Image (spheres, rainbow, N blue to C red):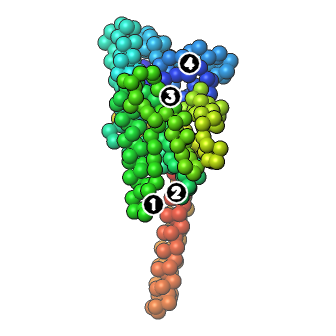
Amino acid sequence: MATTRILLVDNGSLRPEATLALRQLSAEVAQLLGQPVHPVSVLHSHKIDRALLANEPAIIFEQAVRQAKADGIAELIVLPLFIGPSLALTEYLPKVFSEAFPGAMKLTIRPTLFGEDGDGLRRILMENLHEAGWDPDLDTILLCDHGSPVPEVTACRDALARDLAAELNHGSKRVHPVIACSMERREGQEYAFNEPLLATALGQVKGNAIILMLFALPGRHAGPGGDVETIARTHAPESAQVRISPLLSNAKHGMLADLIARHSGLPPRPPTRDWRFWMDVGFTCLGFAAMGMLTIQAFENGLLDGLTGKIAIAAGVALIAFLGYVAFASRRPDGR
């Protein structure tokens, strides 16, 4: 029996598409790590009708802890699907864990998506920005997150906005604005650090805008028909064209799973090769063997005395080496 259990934990949603996307992302991370990764939500998701989830109910963190305790797990490793140090990570999960009387079981929470410097997130955002069709001459970039009551989380977003702006403006004669904003915020001056709101930022846009989504999964806020899309439709100037970028879990590049796997601190799955790789090895070796036999025969028959023969042999060896390289380079480490 495994002594550790890995959980990929998001905040949770009442929308089935959020849980289904979390499951898909968990499977991608599990593929990279070579061991099971369980999709778990902090709250909410267990209320979704299981019929909407392929008849497999969603699991929240409290349930996952109790099951791990019953299974005799020694350590729960949480891979957070959070941008920064949310209260869910710093307070709620440890509280729920302790209240489950875990005994000797240990809880380990790995770094958030921002990590130490946000470099991995910045790369994902850059990919999504270009996929959204960013026009450097016309578009204002609005880096939008949900909005957090924790200043440290908003500081992660603001740092990403600064780093994106620095990268986009490096060596450019024109300043490309990147505005950090929140989808929503709590009432009160103490939460003013979330400003500006997305609705306000959209109203001040001159030209067109791209809403660069700092959301991992689809749900009530992000994705088709979500709150961000509604705000964009109702608050953007009529003259402005507003486009919304893909989410961080964009399947076209799959970079989020790789980022989570790297932040897990766990060793990646060893590379595997399938029969096609070994077939390439065999044919390449046969090619070199055949070239060697032809070279020996050419020596015996005196065909290599001239420069032309030597050039022909060298060209043959180079051709086989090139074909072997092309064959090996076409095989990804996982054999696909």
Q: Position of residue 22 (x, y in %)?
A: 54, 29
What residue is at 39 percent from the left and 17 percent from the top? 93
Q: Nearer the viewer, residue 315 or 313?
A: 315
The amino acid beneath tag 3 is Glu
Q: Position of residue 108 (x, y in %)?
A: 34, 23
Viewer can see residue 77: no
User: Reading the chain from its start, which is encountered first: label 1 or label 3?
Assistant: 1
The amino acid beneath tag 2 is Pro
Q: Is residue 256 above or below residue 68?
A: below
User: Reading the chain from its start, which is encountered first: label 3 or label 2?
Assistant: 2
The amino acid beneath tag 4 is Ser
What residue is at 64 percent from the left and 22 percent from the top? 53
User: Reading the chain from its start, which is encountered first: label 3 or label 4?
Assistant: 4
Identify residue for label 4: 45
What residue is at 39 percent from the left and 16 percent from the top? 92
Marks 3,4: beta carbons within 8 A:
no
Q: Position of residue 198 (x, y in %)?
A: 52, 36
Q: CA distance from mark 2 to mark 1?
A: 9 Å
Residue extending farthest to the right is 51
- Label placed on residue 174: 1
Identify residue for label 2: 136
Identify residue for label 3: 184
Residue mark closest to the camera, 3 vs 4: 3
Q: Nearer the viewer, residue 216 or 262?
A: 216
Q: Nearer the viewer, residue 46 or 240?
A: 240
Disc 2: CA contacts within 10 A as few (<14), some (14-19) or many (>=20)? some
User: Reading the chain from its start, which is encountered first: label 2 or label 1?
Assistant: 2
